[in-house]
Amino acid sequence: MALTRQDRLLLNALQADSRITNQALAETAGMAPSPCWRRVRQLEETGLITGYRAQLDRKKLGLGLLAFIRIKIDSHSEQEALRFEAEVQQLPQVIACYATAGSADFLLQVVAQDLEHYSDFAMAVIRRLPGIKEMETSFVLKEIKPYTALPLGL
């Protein structure tokens, strides 16, 4: 889908503040409110806008530990991968999971209250997932640039 300059302005504004009023959004994009509202609905209907959410402060929620776990699985059969993926979907501590190429098969982004809670989770849950051959954890010491929005116009 080719984005217009106005689309980019709308999407950047919505990424920065999904609670922006239609009037303010229209002003940001240099549009009248009715065409702005219609265009946002089109972007939603085409699936370009997939939802709206609040960004939460994980530390204030008591989730002070952020880690990435690289996982290799035993078998690379589709069935084994799908089984692993289904199990990971059920784990609330896993906030993101990616199938990767390179030295690992999957990369999990995990939150926990602290190192003790992470250790319990890793040993009792992650290590017991189907087909785990190897896992390696990297702990985040400092978030330099956390995800907040996608860059438009690349």
Image (spheres, rainbow, N blue to C red):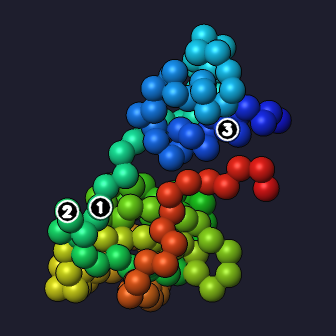
Front residue of 16/95: it is: 16
- Residue displayed at 31% across by 70% down: 111
Amino acid under label 3? Leu
- Foreground mark, 1 or 3, reads 3
Q: x%, y% of residue 80?
A: 51, 64
**Residue 128: image x %, image y %?**
31, 76
Which residue is found at the position 55% from the left and 65% from the top? 98
Q: Is residue 45 visible?
A: no
Q: Of 21 and 41, which appears nearest the observer?
A: 21
**Mark 2, residue position:** 61
Left or right relative to 68: residue 54: left
Q: What quarter of the picture does the C terminus occupy?
A: bottom right
Mark 3 closeness class: few <14, some 14–19, many ≥20 residues within 10 Å: some
Whichever of callouts 1 and 3 sits on the residue coming sooner in the sequence is 3
Q: Amino acid under label 2?
A: Leu
> Total of numbered circles in the picture?
3
Location of residue 118 by image quarter: bottom left
Q: Nearer the viewer, residue 112 or 102?
A: 112
Distance (Cα) linking label 1 and label 3: 26 Å
Q: Residues within 10 Å of mark 1 (few under 14, many from 20)?
A: few
Numbered tag placed on residue 57 in the rendering? 1
- State the separation of the CA atoms marked 2 and 1: 6 Å
- Determine whether label 2 and label 1 are within 8 Å by CB: yes
Whole-angstrom CA distance, mark 3 to mark 2, is 32 Å
Q: Secondary structure at mark 3?
A: helix
Which quadrant: the N terminus? Answer: top right
> Mark 1 is on which residue type?
Asp
Residue 138 found in image quarter: bottom left
Q: Earlier in the sequence, mark 3 or mark 2?
A: 3
Residue located beneath label 3 in the image: 9
